């Protein structure tokens, strides 16, 4: 394969997997010798095409992917664009900050950010990774997996990134069970003191693309009514995003 073709094949391989892939796994899928592939993966990492997710055990999407994803919301009818437009509407109605986030290995990364009209806006910078088990967006996405897969992804241990995060796997599993029952994930004081977040996960019925949508707020100033309304709107957003697309209109 020519070098550009190899890069494209590697990117497709990474995109098809929700978990970080090792050199051996990519080599087996593409039929490329490991020594050649290892040099290519390192070059792609250095150019921000890839990131060494899960410590150094495998490769996942790099910063360049997130930059491209962030640009998508400017136009088009992709699932990412629809999710961005949905979050924009949530921010306009609720007044809080909103994000569209993706999972890379065991981290969550915000790729789209919108600001609401309230004078107090809180959140984390775009591109800053958060441990998947220690934030609302991450647990919303983990709740879409079965428990066995979650344990495999996290190597049966939690990050303990915050005192408010799950401190062991049993506690994490209990929170995921609650998310599946309630339909949303919540965090308070995990990504920062006084920062609250409500999140849902949504999957594109066509491509299978998996995203998390959330609103973040200063927890001390949010009323019970506002929190309930945010949960309601997030549930409606997921239903709309995951509704089957209407069939194309036949040409006359």
Image (spheres, rainbow, N blue to C red):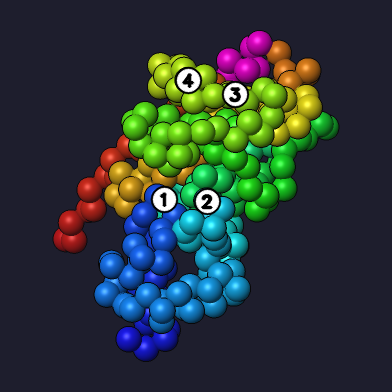
Q: Earlier in the sequence, mark 2 or mark 4?
A: 2
Which residue is the extreme one toward the bottom?
2
Identify the mark at residue 54; answer none if there is no mark. 2
Element type where label 1 sits in the image: loop
**Is residue 123 found inside the magenta-colored segment of the image?**
no
The numbered mark, 1 or 2, whose residue comes first in the sequence reads: 1
Residue at x-position 37% and y-position 82% = 5
Return the mark for residue 170.
4
Q: Which residue is mark 3?
A: 167
Q: Is residue 244 visible?
A: yes
Question: Up-down: is 128 above or below 96?
Answer: below
Looking at the rendering, which quadrant does residue 24 occupy?
A: bottom left
Q: Main SS type for the magenta part?
A: helix
Mark 4 and mark 3: Cα distance apart in space: 8 Å
Q: Residue at x 83, y 32 (%)?
A: 119
Q: Which residue is mark 1?
A: 19
Which residues make up the magenta segment? 224-230
Residue 234 visible to the viewer: no
Lower sequence index among marks 1 and 3: 1
Give the mark nearest the N terminus, 4 or 1. 1
Q: CA distance from mark 2 to mark 3?
A: 19 Å
Marks 1 and 3 sit apart, C-alpha to C-alpha, by 23 Å
């Amino acid at each position: 394969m020519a070098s550009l073709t190899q890069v494209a094949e590697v990117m497709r391989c990474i995109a098809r997997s929700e978990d970080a892939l090792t050199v051996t796994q990519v080599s087996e899928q593409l039929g490329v010798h490991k020594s050649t592939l290892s040099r290519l993966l390192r070059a792609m990492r250095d150019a921000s095409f890839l990131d060494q997710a899960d410590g150094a055990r495998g490769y996942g999407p790099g910063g360049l992917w997130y930059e491209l994803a962030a640009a998508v919301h400017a136009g088009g009818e992709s699932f990412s664009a629809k999710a961005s437009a949905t979050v924009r509407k949530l921010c306009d109605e609720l007044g809080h900050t909103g994000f569209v986030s993706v999972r890379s290995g065991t981290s969550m990364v915000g790729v789209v950010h919108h600001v609401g009209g309230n004078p107090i806006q809180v959140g984390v910078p775009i591109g800053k990774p958060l441990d998947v088990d220690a934030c609302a967006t991450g647990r919303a996405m983990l709740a879409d997996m079965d428990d066995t897969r979650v344990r495999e992804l996290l190597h049966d241990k939690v990050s303990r990134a915050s005192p408010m995060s799950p401190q062991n796997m049993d506690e994490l599993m209990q929170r995921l069970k609650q998310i599946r029952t309630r339909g949303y994930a919540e965090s308070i004081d995990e990504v920062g003191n006084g920062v609250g977040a409500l999140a849902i996960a949504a999957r594109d019925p066509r491509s299978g693309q998996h995203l998390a949508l959330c609103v973040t707020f200063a927890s001390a100033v949010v009323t019970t009514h506002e929190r309930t309304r945010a949960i309601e709107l997030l549930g409606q957003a997921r239903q709309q995003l995951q509704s089957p697309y209407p069939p194309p209109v036949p040409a006359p």
